[in-house]
Image (spheres, rainbow, N blue to C red):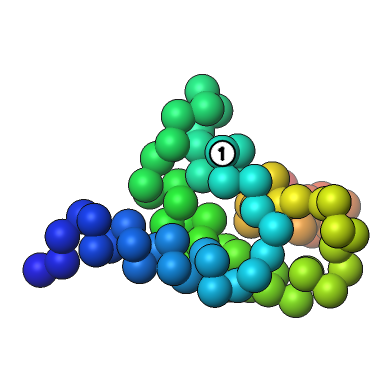
């Protein structure tokens, strides 16, 4: 079983290895601005999906938030499902 410090080090290493400009204070904290290890783990997993983004960012730009999303149903589907 891995210790918490080893697990945290692994997560940080994964985020650092992507070479993306991150604002860690915002990216890995909750809505109250408190760091949460679970948020960091989730955000690091999502960071892997946007590693290509580094090519499109300007030098002064930083990543503040990553989130998942979905496309809402079309009007026709909404009308037929009722």
Classify residue 11 as left or right of residue 32. left
Q: Residue at x 70, y 58 (%)?
A: 21
| Left or right: where 55 falls relative to 6 | right
Find disc 1 in the rendering and name its residue.
Answer: 25
Q: Is residue 72 above or below residue 35?
A: below
Residue ID at (38%, 48%)? 38
Residue occupying the point 50% across, 33% down: 30
Q: Secondary structure at mark 1?
A: helix
Closer to the camera in the image, 34 or 60: 60
Residue 73 percent location from the top left of the image:
77, 56
- Say few, some or many: other residues with alpha carbon within 10 Å of mark 1 (under 14 / 14 to 19 / 20 or more): few
Q: Is residue 9 above or below residue 26?
A: below
Furthest residue toward top: 32
Measuring 27% from the left and 62% from the top, which residue is drawn there? Answer: 7
Q: Position of residue 49 (x, y in %)?
A: 63, 72
Relative to 67, say whether 35 is above or below.
above
């Amino acid at each position: 079983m891995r210790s918490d410090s080893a697990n945290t080090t692994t997560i940080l290493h994964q985020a650092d290895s992507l070479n993306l400009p991150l604002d860690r204070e915002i990216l890995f904290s909750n809505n109250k601005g408190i760091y949460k290890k679970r948020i960091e783990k989730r955000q690091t997993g999502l960071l892997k999906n946007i590693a290509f983004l580094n090519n499109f960012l300007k030098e002064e730009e930083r990543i503040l938030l990553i989130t998942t999303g979905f496309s809402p149903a079309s009007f026709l589907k909404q009308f037929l499902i009722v």
